[in-house]
Image (cartoon, coloured by chain):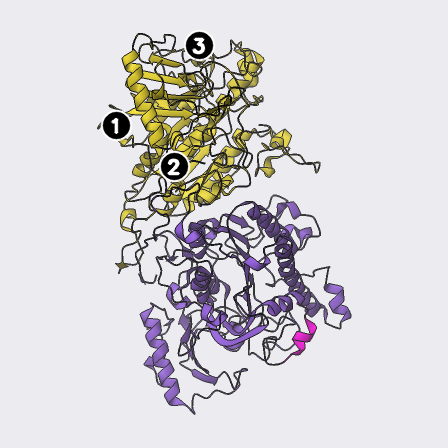
Chain colours: A yellow, B purple
Amino acid sequence: MKKSLLIPFVLAPMAIPSVQGKEQVRKDQTEKRPNIIFFLVDDMGWQDTSLPFWTRKTHYNEEFETPNMERLAAKGMMFTQAYASSISSPSRCSLLTGANAARHCVTNWTYPKNEQTDSPSSVFKVADWNVNGICEVPGISHTFQVTALPELLKENGYHTIHCGKAHFGAVDTPGESPYHFGFEVNIAGHAGGGLASYLGEDNYGNRTDGKPSPAFAVPGLEKYWGTHTFVTEALTLEAIKALDHAKEYNQPFFLYMAHYAIHIPIDKDARYYQKYLDKGLSPKEAAYAGLIEGMDKSLGDLMDWLDKNGETENTIIIFMSDNGGLASQPDWRDGTPYTQNSPLKSGKGSAYEGGIREPMIVSWPGVVKPDTKCDKYMIIEDFFPTILEMAGVKHYSTVQQVDGKSIVPLLTQAGDPSNGRSLYWNFPNNWGNTGPGIGPTCTVRKGDWKLIYYYDTGKKELFDIKEDIGEKNDLSLQHPDIVKRLSKDLGRYLRKVGGQRPTFKATGLPCPWPDEIDR
Amino acid sequence: MKKSLLIPFVLAPMAIPSVQGKEQVRKDQTEKRPNIIFFLVDDMGWQDTSLPFWTRKTHYNEEFETPNMERLAAKGMMFTQAYASSISSPSRCSLLTGANAARHCVTNWTYPKNEQTDSPSSVFKVADWNVNGICEVPGISHTFQVTALPELLKENGYHTIHCGKAHFGAVDTPGESPYHFGFEVNIAGHAGGGLASYLGEDNYGNRTDGKPSPAFAVPGLEKYWGTHTFVTEALTLEAIKALDHAKEYNQPFFLYMAHYAIHIPIDKDARYYQKYLDKGLSPKEAAYAGLIEGMDKSLGDLMDWLDKNGETENTIIIFMSDNGGLASQPDWRDGTPYTQNSPLKSGKGSAYEGGIREPMIVSWPGVVKPDTKCDKYMIIEDFFPTILEMAGVKHYSTVQQVDGKSIVPLLTQAGDPSNGRSLYWNFPNNWGNTGPGIGPTCTVRKGDWKLIYYYDTGKKELFDIKEDIGEKNDLSLQHPDIVKRLSKDLGRYLRKVGGQRPTFKATGLPCPWPDEIDR
């Protein structure tokens, strides 16, 4: 397990010493604070929407229909270079902690306790990563100890609601439960990172014959079993009930709306399927389009709730995906493998843009200018300080070191935190699916340059992302100086934060850091 | 709403700055810490057990059967003078906060938001008490802001489980949910302070015909609906599942096992009912005895779980009731009203011993001497600092002022925190049921003396509790000096902590404090 710098966890004073008034108030809570909805889609690619995040519309933008994403974008700011990790758990753990995946070392997807989910490789042994995920208490093997975002929001007066997929910690560890991280409501979240079924008719994968349900059966939606309610809709209905309830409380709310959609299996949503067939999509693609539109409807339903309840002007909505669209599994979708995020290369699990670049929108009435676009880059751990800043939480401390930077200056167009900044990824793992950029890698992006280093082969690739968004032209041989500079930057960072690397099976030696080899 | 002194809420450092070892550890968590089960029974009287808490056995001790309470007492220490408030919410709020009811001002039972549950009186208007209960966030009308016991235990590494009746805050306020107070698991707890039905056959009071369920329908036990599972058993089965789960976590656990039993309605538990009829009890008393034995079986089942799982030696069990046995409702039980806690006078809702003296046992292997008895007095808010001390939580701060004193010295027989101490009660309310000592009162106990002051009549009563446990001989006229001294003590305390008092309807003036009138 990784070593980690521990920061003393001292909370800022949360109450003023003596109040003579009628109500007990905390100084930083006297101002009205915004509600925050973090709308996170699972495995959604950059092209899985009718809203173009690229400079031009693609055929996917024509096929898919996401009117509510368009509605949200018209009210807020689109980010064209928003990054996450290429796999779910690393992204979600970064989001909840502000720590880069290289630091928290939850670098692959979690589920079984004390077990690596990596596929075996004959060449290398994957790093001894934190297979049990994140955890708020110390002493739990193979976890990264944290002070989680919802915990801080709860402590600062927010009513905290978790809805959908959690995937923060392995089963049978404390972090399997959203309640462990300061959520006060949990709808259907557990250790599982996927879902057995979208269908109410299938009880979302739960068995009723007394035999054990599969690991990814969705928990907690019993009341919809046997109905025609798609899981995306069931989650939305339950989230809205939680919001109705939250409205009774005199507190701002934080709704973490983390859909299971659009993770595989690509079940057919009867509300949309025929429409997409009629549009000419293949059955697989029509089903996929239905998953997307169902998710988009959920966004619209939440926005409608805000409108109806007079909360629109006081609510921030952040739209994000946790990793790139799945493009390495030909049995699930049609089209040439690895092209479904085009113009981005590859997809989920890959170091290429298709694995890590996400559709992202932020609406913040009165603060973010409507219908704007930001081409600066940011990364998923940035949400941690950003959301705390949005919530007016100025004084806080955390067990973990926070790597993320607030993107509020980008939102207010008051500054550019991405200027001169390097973004880092570390994946000393073996996901299982194969394809371009999928393998044990570490990556750095600085300015327009992006360097990918393959731990197992020592290969380095250099791309000018601005000129070559599809990562077709490896410029590493043309620019050895840049390769060297970025390798050094990346190697230093990984060592500094306690990043991990695989080991060669043949020699038992660790794979070199990127700045330990030249090519 | 009451004013309250706010203490700055600064948590002690929870992590040491830098650890080079394999695991991240917190200094005060390196020692093995005990599991804690707080087993709280609702409305259980001092005589509702086969275990005699008095100096001799009563006929109730002969009728009721609580072998597991006897088993627990043989392992630990019985307290013969353990006190609570005379009503549920005040006791539970004191337990979770360490604050005396005079301070937290949740002085009557809570349920509807912003509404007093008091019965109207033609003579007085009850105090503007905190009808919405306790709450961890500021700014919620008519609540007492707190840092709750489970929150502190969670922050210090405990896995926190709530099972059963909560009753900490009014419906539609944040405090209605145990998750709001740092519990990580909640089984069947909500704003309700009672239960619509004990019977699985009745779905615990939940309606399935589409019409709204009654307020006190027990939530969250859907899987037992339509079965023959008595609610006490269902809660125990679920608590044991939570313990099985907790065992997977490398954390000590805090199980707050707060039974709905033995609150009215006195439903028949088919497992026990006939046995008590055969013993010669009347149908009502046989049903009541069944509620008690079912509760006792739950205690035994938890103790069996500890034995089977090797956790007995590392688990503290605290047995307690939240107020006296119900004795003012002749339609529910047989016998002369107000005698069912005999030798104690009156029952639930009363300032007499029958309303406030509770059966209490603590087992703490290796620390508390088995089969011992403590005749020193203590009060329910003492559990707050006691449990934190048991858990090894040395450094903590709270929003609220803590009035309770740790009773660890009593448990270890190393000291007597009750020596020279006054205990205080304040009930500026009108419960509804009538009977001896039931009405707007404040009370002080110091040494063997107990003074009760009736706000509405100005009457004072003085008892020598040691000599007159049944409070038959009012000695106030014989000892005006003691009446005066205790009145002063009580009046000073109530004013100091922001205690409230009723107002006379005729004049609009507040009822005098006990030290403002002589008689």
Structural crowding at the residue carrying mark 1, measured as other residues with C-alpha within 10 Å and reported as few (<14), some (14–19) or many (≥20): some
Whether labels 3 and 2 belong to a single chain: the reply is: yes
| Type of amino acid under label 1 | Pro
- Magenta segment, which residues? B54-66
Residue A255 appears left or right of B274: left
Residue sitting nearer the eye, B220 or B81? B81
**Disc 3 versus disc 1: distance between alpha carbons?**
33 Å
Quadrant containing the N terminus of chain B is: bottom left
At label 3, the amino acid type is His
List the residue tagged with mark 3.
Answer: A59
Q: Is residue A377 visible?
A: no
Q: Which mark is residue A417?
A: 1
Q: Residues within 10 Å of mark 2 (few under 14, many from 20)?
A: many
Indicate the secondary structure of the residue bearing disc 3.
helix
**Image location (x, y in percent) of residue B239:** 59, 52
Tell me which amino acid carries mark 2.
Thr
Which residue position holds label 2? Answer: A97
Residue B59 falls inside the magenta stretch: yes
Q: Main SS of the magenta segment?
A: loop
Spatial CA distance of label 3 from label 2 is: 37 Å
Above or below: residue B322 compared with residue B204: below
Q: Chain of mark 3?
A: A
A410 part of magenta stretch: no
| Place of residue B195 in the rendered image (x, y in percent of width and height, measured from the top left) | 58, 57
Q: Nearer the viewer, residue B261 or A43?
A: A43
Neighbor class of circle 3 (other Cα within 10 Å; few <14, some 14-19, many 20+) is few
Residue A19 occupies quadrant: bottom left
Which label sits in the foreground, 3 or 2?
2
Are dots 3 and 2 in contact, CB under 8 Å?
no
Q: Chain of mark 1?
A: A
In the depicted structure, whether residue B217 falls above or below residue A284: below
Q: Is residue B55 visible?
A: yes
